[in-house]
Image (cartoon, rainbow, N blue to C red):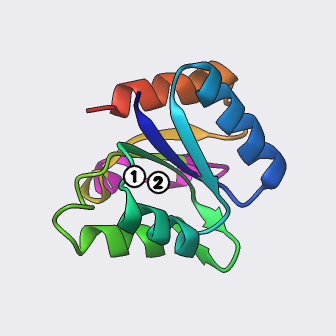
Amino acid sequence: MTRVLLVEDDAWLGELEADVLTRAGFEVEHVPHGLAAIDIIDARPPEVLVLDVLLAGSTAFSLLHELQSYDDTQKIPVVLCTNLADQFDKKQLESYGVKRVIDKTTMQPADIVAAVKAATP
């Protein structure tokens, strides 16, 4: 079973996304911010990271920079979920391990499942 770490500070949306991924057969752990994600990643790295861009207290890029500084964590594939999808150059995001960007304003439940499946090694 593929382990997914979901970092989403909106409790309602995080619960919804976790439920959709769990029903699709993934093992999901949901945390609300980057510091909690680092603790989880240090203890048991996920196979895929689903990451909101604008998090309470920081942004996804703080966490992505941290992950890129270690050989083992820089290989974790990332799916970004954001309201700002049209503002990112997807080619530049590849250096952070970002495999997919999902636009929260238009996403459907199947989109997050498809993105995680596509990012799974």
Amino acid carrying label 1: it is Asp
> Disc 1 vs disc 2: Cβ atoms closer than 8 Å?
yes
| Residue 89, disc | 1
Residue 15 among those drawn in magenta? no
Q: Is residue 61 visible?
A: no
At 57% from the left edge and 70% from the top edge, which residue is drawn? 36
Relative vertical location of residue 3 with respect to residue 39 in this rendering, above or below: above
At 21% from the left edge and 71% from the top edge, which residue is drawn? 70
Quarter placement of the N terminus: top left
> Please, what secondary structure does the residue beneath circle 1 have?
loop
Residue 90 among those drawn in magenta? yes
Amino acid carrying label 2: it is Phe
Query: Mark 1 and mark 2: span between their CA atoms?
Result: 4 Å
Quarter placement of the C terminus: top left
From the image, tell me which residue sits under label 2: 88
Q: Which residues are magenta?
A: 81-93
